Image (cartoon, rainbow, N blue to C red):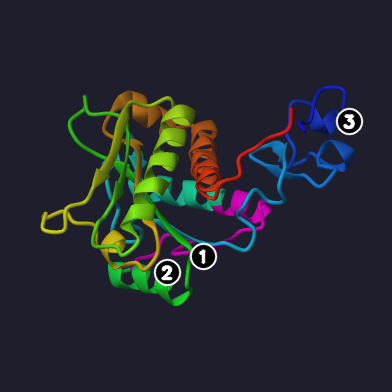
Amino acid sequence: GQCVNSCTPQCSGKQCGDNGCSGSCGTCSNGQTCSNGQCVNGGSNGLSGKKICIDAGHGGSSTGTAAYSLIEKNVNLDVALRLKQILLTNEAIPIMIRTSDIDVSLEKRTSIANNNNCDIFVSIHCNGDKPNAKGTETFWAKPNPYYDKSIELANKVNSKMVSYLKTNNRGIKEDIYSAPGSLYVLRNTKMPAILVELAFLTNKDDNNKLKDSYYKQEAARAILNGLQEYYGNSSTCT
């Protein structure tokens, strides 16, 4: 199910679905489809037709955390656009909150998700704190009517993210409604909703990963694979 060196030269070292990987080396057969660089069983791995709302946190005048020459809003958008592409490969329907550096209010973000009757809402962020704080964490909120499903999704995505980014696992966390930092988008969406804090921009090691295109692609893949596992089909060919 993967492109190997014995295939045509342009496929050397590539996986199915990669740019420049075409022909028999870039496609899957026998009823399988390309997912996460591998040929998988079961159609498009459970995501076909699912509306996945992708919220690239911050944007425009809201920069988010900034450290070591990285600005959060840009990292969030980069990962969101990567996620969009691999969702399309899996026949999902990505609903994008933003695709450029613009301001989008919290109210507008939730209305986009709700008005499009999205199946899942994923907000992508980066963390910031003291330099020794590091790792990945994923939030859910009980005021969301689908909070039980949000917990399930948060567990699956957070586990994949820690594995793929090789970051410290800070776990999944409930966003308490009465807390000053309550996450509006999680409390006001009408579908399972999570907010993923990829890593800490203020930690040098985490920051270096988020500067690297490889790890940003891995972050997108982690969300994709978490979604696939959530929908109950993650078998891959050998």
Q: Is residue 65 left or right of residue 236?
A: left
State which quarter of the image contains the C terminus: top right
- SS for dot 2: helix
Tell me the quadrant of the picture where the N terminus can be found: top right
Q: Is residue 194 visible?
A: no
What's drawn in magenta, residue-wise? 84-104
Q: Earlier in the sequence, mark 3 or mark 1?
A: 3
Residue labelled with disc 2: 113
Q: Amino acid at mark 1?
A: Ile
Q: Amino acid at mark 3?
A: Thr
> Residue 46: where, in percent of width, then height?
62, 52
Up-down relation of residue 36 to residue 111 (above or below): above
Contact, mark 1 vs mark 2 (Cβ under 8 Å) = yes
Disc 2 and disc 3: Cα gap in Å?
42 Å
Q: Secondary structure at mark 3?
A: loop
Q: Which corner quadrant of the image does residue 22 belong to? A: top right
The correct choice, above or below, for 41 with respect to 188 in the image is: above
- Drawn side of residue 45 relative to residue 74, left or right: right
Identified at 61% across, 58% down, the residue is 92
Residue at position x 36%, y 58% from top? 59
Cα distance, mark 3 to mark 1?
A: 35 Å
Looking at the rendered structure, which numbered label has been put on residue 95?
A: 1
- The vertical placement of 213 against 190, above or below, is above
Q: Which residue in the protein does label 3 denote?
A: 8
Judged from the image, the secondary structure of the residue bearing numbered disc 1 is strand
Image location of residue 56, percent across then percent down: 41, 55
